[in-house]
Image: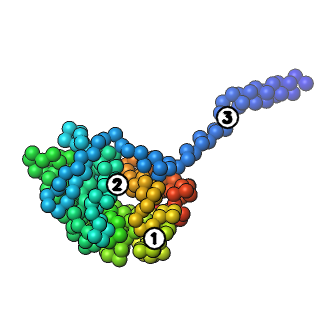
Amino acid sequence: MRSLSRRALLAVAALTVTATVVPPAAVAAPVPAPTSPRVYETAGPHKAVKAPGGPAHTLYYPDDLASSGTEHPVLIWGNGTNATVGQYEALFTHLASWGYVVAAANTGQSGSGEEMLAGARYLIAENSRAGSVFQGRIATGKIAAAGHSQGGGGAIAAGADPLVKTTLPIMPGPQGNVNKLHGPAFFVSGQADVIVPSFYVHSRFLACDQVPAVYGQLKGATHFLDGDSRYRVIGAITAWLQYHLAGDANAKSVFYGADYGLARDKDGWSATERNQKAS
């Protein structure tokens, strides 16, 4: 009896020690919801300056650029056929408020992409020119190409150049070869676009399988981005640049991850898709 009691006491002691040292099961932290692209429709902290960039370009940039002490990413832009820079000014001033330098080609014929690349080269030269407001302020390794309609095709053509790190064709024409892009691409179509139909833009997205590519169809949007679709695309462009050029971790979840923000915005985007490299 004495031996049995001793064994019983030892067993109880062992159970007590085990209960003391084994931690409770860990509770998984909740997964945050993906960021909505609408977050990026709000203006950034900077005021925008508009200035000529030689005879061929119009520039938009933050008013405190010279005193910022940092290098700023660049967007080179191509207008639609016979369109003017002023028709897209809401986008350019918005991006400047977020800290970007925009070089918009002063032409409605930018399908070759060369007019846009000339803007990048102009800013790279200004980055090295003593006395320039851009001296030491251009992130020469962080340049994106974007454009609308013919300019969207021009952005694809420009995106083949090593200067360009990411490309955003908005309702693009047939110019350029998507298989020559070497960085991530964001293709945008309009659900009600009869000039560059959404199925055509989608086909260009499908052909771009060598780099991460995302497709978004703006709900109810015509080719001319009427109404709310204009602000939706401004927010999405800003989010794309914020992740790919500025390293904004929140912006990443707008386009990437199992449950991404662009797909959640059903009021603004009637269809979204990602290729295998983006998924």
Q: Earlier in the sequence, mark 1 or mark 2?
A: 2
Tell me if residue 187 can be seen: no
Earlier residue among tags 1 and 3: 3
Q: Which residue is mark 2?
A: 91
Instruction: Look at the numbered discs 3 and 2 and tell me whether their residues touch, using CB distance below 8 Å.
Output: no
As drawn, is 92 to the left or to the right of 268? left
Q: Which residue is at 43% across, 72% downward? A: 201
Please tell me whether mark 3 sits on a helix, a strand or a loop: loop
Q: Which residue in the protein does label 3 denote?
A: 24
Q: Is residue 60 visible?
A: yes
- Left or right position of 113 against 36: left
Q: Which color scheme did the rendering employ for the protein?
A: rainbow
**Tag 1 residue:** 193
Residue 27 at x, y percent in the picture? 64, 39
Residue 138, percent from left and from top: 22, 50
- Residue type marked 2: Leu
Badge nearest the viewer, 3 or 2: 2
Which amino acid is tagged 1? Asp
Q: Residue at x 19, y 51 (%)?
A: 51
Q: Calculate the distance from the C-alpha at mark 1 to the C-alpha at mark 2.
A: 20 Å
Among all residues in the image, which is located at the extreme left? 130
Please say if the residues under marks 1 and 2 sit with CB atoms less than 8 Å apart: no
